Image (cartoon, grey):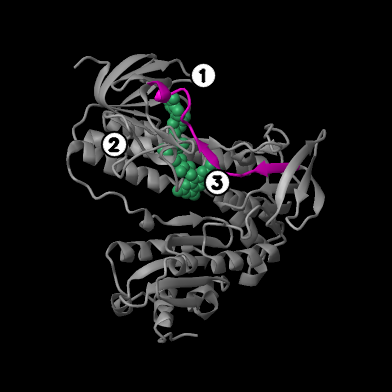
Amino acid sequence: MADTDFDVIIIGSGPGGYVTAIRAAQLGFKTAIIERDYLGGICLNWGCIPTKALLRSAEIFHYLQHAKDYGLTVEKVGYDPTAVVKRSRVVAKRLNDGVGFLMRKNKVAVIWGEAALQTPGRVAVKAARSEAPKGALGPGTYQAKHVILATGARPRVLPGLEPDKKLVWTYFEAMAPDRMPKSLLVVGSGAIGVEFASFYRTLGAEVTVVEVLPQILPAEDAEIAAFARKAFEKQGIRILTGAKVTKLDKKADSVTATIDDGKGGTQTLTVERAISAVGVIGNIENLGLEKLGVKTERGMIAVDSFNRTSVPGIYAIGDVSGPPLLAHKAEHEGIVCIEAIKGLKPHPMDRHLIPACTYCSPQIASVGLTEATAKAQNREIRVGRFPFVGNGKAIALGEDQGLVKVVFDKATGELLGAHMVGAEVTELIQGYVIAMNLETTEAELMHTIFPHPTLSEMMKEAVLDAYGQVLNI
Ligand SMILES: Cc1cc2nc3c(=O)[nH]c(=O)nc-3n(C[C@H](O)[C@H](O)[C@H](O)COP(=O)(O)OP(=O)(O)OC[C@H]3O[C@@H](n4cnc5c(N)ncnc54)[C@H](O)[C@@H]3O)c2cc1C
């Protein structure tokens, strides 16, 4: 095989692309990955990981401010915004280097540049604007029997709310601010908007969140979202729901937003900075898709349950193949896709079992059906709840505000969904995800012994509550 010929070429090295490349190499495919910007994609460089580093700084700052509650004395609490951002960038760089290491370890060729399909098995690569990592192959034409598109997504831009990098930010600028704004407007209350609202509020900014839908965190269970809203408002975050930012007027160092309150009125709000967090759109342009007849739907590449596109030999995974736009969805899709290419007959991904986590304070985590979606499907359900205030570990941690909620099918005892808000719930949810993958019933969950004292005990108590057997409340 010539140096430009591969079994599999993956375009995009985010969590979808790079994980698929490793699995492809494990399966014996001669594999190449093409990247134009950063190894690790949005997730490692401008998404999941650097935001969690920022939120960690904010969390520690919060604890230091409340040191007295724990019997501790701290003389002076403060922060250096440049150092907070620097730490987050160092964390991102470390993971970006890690992907380079993993590619070398698995003998995946890295090709540096902007890729486009010429024909189903032929990819043209133009020079990238960014600097290539050591050892990467350069521009040229490359061939492979299978081409997997993992090109990810970018911020959606709404008319009137166009980001300008200075006053109106996307997540890129919000993650590396030149200084901490005293006041901030966040447009959109999905996971990205809420995480930034939480970060900036904890560090002292006056934060207003405007959401067009009636509830914040629109994809979450209504009761959990309402609980989170109360907690955010208690922290001083101002939240407007059912309201729409229609215009952002930029001045020299401030932005004035016009907000339609959804009840026939408008108001204006002047802030130092605004973040547009109104969703993302797929990177489907300039890939040669139209020419080859690759079908797209609502700005994403249409795929079947093994991520095959409408053109044989071309596949799409991750954000570019549609929601949910989550790193673990991208990774899992990639594994299923490459194993199917190999002929291993993997199970298609069960979208119902993809967990969702938001790392604000308090954290939010969920999997499966919400109470409302279960009812909308005309299911007879049993709902169980357990509040953090009834859990010894939560009280010992000083984190007694939160809720665990479970939704069961009344007839079969099947766990249909689990929803949580509170400290560390993003680490807890996986227990329910495993249970649901194993099609566990309420009886098996009740029979399971949870260690004491842990926050996880609330997961069992919520199940017990659904069946009238709750103990500690
Ligand atoms: C602020 C923020 C926080 C987030 N937090 C979380 C979180 O906590 N948990 C979670 O699960 N998800 C989170 N996400 C979402 C997560 O980042 C994405 O779901 C994930 O990155 C998608 O992975 P991907 O592989 O599909 O694409 P990406 O990570 O977007 O990678 C795509 C790559 O393809 C490259 N590319 C595109 N076109 C070309 C081309 N023509 N040629 C060469 N290269 C190309 C891009 O440069 C990019 O590196 C967050 C996102 C943001 C923005």
Disc 3 or 1, which lies upstream in sequence?
A: 3
Q: Quadrant of residue 311?
A: top left
Q: Which residue is mark 2?
A: 22
Q: Is residue 26 above or below residue 460?
A: above
Task: Judge: label 3 CB < 8 Å from ligand 1.
Answer: yes
Residue type, label 2: Ile
Q: Is residue 445 above or below residue 190?
A: below
Residue drawn where x is 39% and y is 36% of the image: 98
Above/below status of 259 relative to 36: below
Query: Which residue position holds label 3?
Result: 51
Disc 1 residue type? Arg
Q: Quadrant of the N terminus?
A: top left
Q: Residue at x 26, y 38 (%)?
A: 338
Image-quadrant location for residue 222: bottom right
Q: Tell me the kind of residue under disc 3.
A: Thr
Locate residue 240 relative to residue 462 in the image: left or right. Answer: right
Residue picked out by circle 1: 129
Disc number at residue 206? none
Residue 181's x, y, as percent?
A: 74, 44
Give the Cα separation between the discs numbered 2 and 3.
25 Å
Relative to 166, 195 lies left or right: left
Q: How many marks?
A: 3
Task: Note whether residue 71 is visible.
Answer: no
Whole-number angstrom distance, CA of label 1 to CA of label 2: 26 Å
* 93 up-or-down from 382: above or below: above
Q: Is residue 363 visible?
A: yes
Point out the stretch of residues depicted in magenta: 273-291
Residue 385: % across, % down: 48, 76
